[in-house]
Image (cartoon, grey):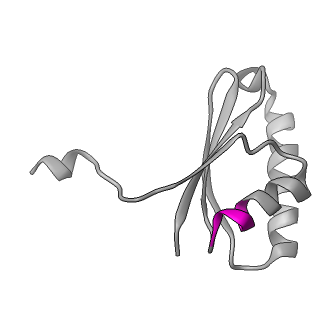
Amino acid sequence: MPKYVIEREIPGAGKLSSQELKGISQKSCGVLGKMGPQIQWLQSYVTDDKIYCVYIAPNEATVREHARQGGFPANKVSEVRTMIDPTTAE
């Protein structure tokens, strides 16, 4: 199944408290539970003004529907074509 990176523009994201991040995570998981197992949240990276989320989903439309239902921005959704890491250089 395809993997996607979602860029969410959230001003001040890096200053969100652990309780605020917990609330966002709970909301996301609640929506995922309703949508079923075809979409999975793997992890997210919080920066100063953006959150980058990694999801597995059948298509971009499913990722965007999750964002719509959760009330989250999905400013850019990019399908991961391949992954590399330091072992790629070997």
Query: Magenta stretch?
Result: 59-63
Between 77 and 43, the one nearer to me in the picture: 77
Work out which residue is located at the far bottom of the displayed protein and give it. 37
Q: How many marks?
A: 0
Rendering coords of residue 22 (x, y %): 82, 44
Left or right: 44 in relation to 71 = left
- From the viewer's perspective, is residue 35 above or below residue 28? below
For the point 36% across and 58% down, the residue is 82
> Taken as a whole, is the magenta stretch helix, strand or loop?
helix
For the point 62% across and 27% down, the residue is 47
Left or right: 78 in relation to 84 = right
Work out which residue is located at the far left of the displayed protein and give it. 90
- From the viewer's perspective, is residue 13 above or below residue 4? above
For the point 87% across and 64% down, the residue is 30
Left or right: 5 in relation to 87 = right
For the point 87% across and 55% down, the residue is 68
Tell me which corner region of the image, top left, top right, bottom left or bottom right, holds residue 33. Answer: bottom right
Between 13 and 61, the one nearer to me in the picture: 61
Rendering coords of residue 50 (x, y %): 68, 30
Left or right: 53 in relation to 61 = left
Rendering coords of residue 21 (x, y %): 80, 39
Residue 46 lies within the magenta run: no
Between 34 and 68, the one nearer to me in the picture: 68
